[in-house]
Image: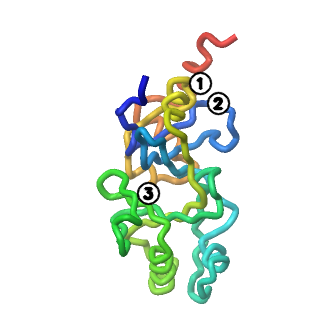
Amino acid sequence: MGVTSTSLAPGFLLASPPLGDPNFDRTVVLLAVHGDGGALGFVVNRKASLSMSELFRIAGYETEALEDDSPVLLGGPVQRSSGWILGLDLEVPSPSELITVGDRIGITSSREAFDALARDAKTRGASTIDPHKRIVLLGYSGWAPGQLEGEVAAGAWLPVPLDEGIVFSTKIEERWEKAYALLGLTPAFGMTMRSVGSA
């Protein structure tokens, strides 16, 4: 039997409570790509242990006027040394360097995008809102062909429609609950459903 052609992307994957894997406990994954070749997503509610200012410094950018205490996020357990920018209406030199998610969300790992982010941060200052609402993520979440379908069927993930507001207008620590609310559910309901039939 082949892999279903029904794609869950673009959308969210909510970790069912309790998922058991500490990498994904209470996580919201923005699923960017899903098809016969597998799936690619980014966790959007887990903070890394460094700020944007620290990341700029580590990446070799001039740190003057780059005081930005906004958090960097952990996009997933795969290649945590890789950096990605998630934002709205992103512009990159080549379309092949941009993963489009829905109508306006884009994800890129291009150096030019990071250069632009650092340049804009210096020009704009930390107190001014970024019109592209860019978020930096370290690493990503990946699934082999058929793996995600199996995990969803086993109840490990709850697919939820994409909502830009969850990513860009909701506090990081509230995103899991807010995403559950999109379906009219609460995490407690999900936990009850998951425990039905368990010994």
Judging by the rendered image, the residue that carries numbered circle 2 is 18
**SS state under label 3:** helix
Q: Amino acid at mark 3?
A: Phe
Query: Which comes before the other along the chain, label 3 or label 1?
Result: 3
Q: Which mark is residue 54?
A: none
Residue 125 position within the rendered picture, expressed as x and y whole percent measured from the top left: 49, 82
Circle 1 packing at 10 Å, graded few (<14), some (14-19), many (20+), is some
Judging by the rendered image, the residue that carries numbered circle 1 is 191
Query: Which comes before the other along the chain, label 3 or label 2?
Result: 2
Q: Name which residue lies at 62% across and 17% down.
A: 195
Judging by the rendered image, the residue that carries numbered circle 3 is 168
Residues marked 3 and 2 touching at CB (< 8 Å):
no
- Quadrant where the image shows the N terminus: top left
**Which image quadrant is residue 156 in?**
top right
Q: Name which residue lies at 48% across and 41% down.
A: 38
Residue 15 position within the rendered picture, expressed as x and y whole percent measured from the top left: 57, 36
Residue 162 position within the rendered picture, expressed as x and y whole percent measured from the top left: 38, 44
Question: Distance of mark 1 from mark 2, alpha carbons?
Answer: 7 Å
Question: Distance of mark 3 from mark 2, alpha carbons?
Answer: 26 Å
Q: Name which residue lies at 63% across and 73% down.
A: 55
Residues marked 1 and 2 touching at CB (< 8 Å):
yes
Query: Which comes before the other along the chain, label 1 or label 2?
Result: 2
Circle 3 packing at 10 Å, graded few (<14), some (14-19), many (20+), is some
**SS state under label 2:** loop
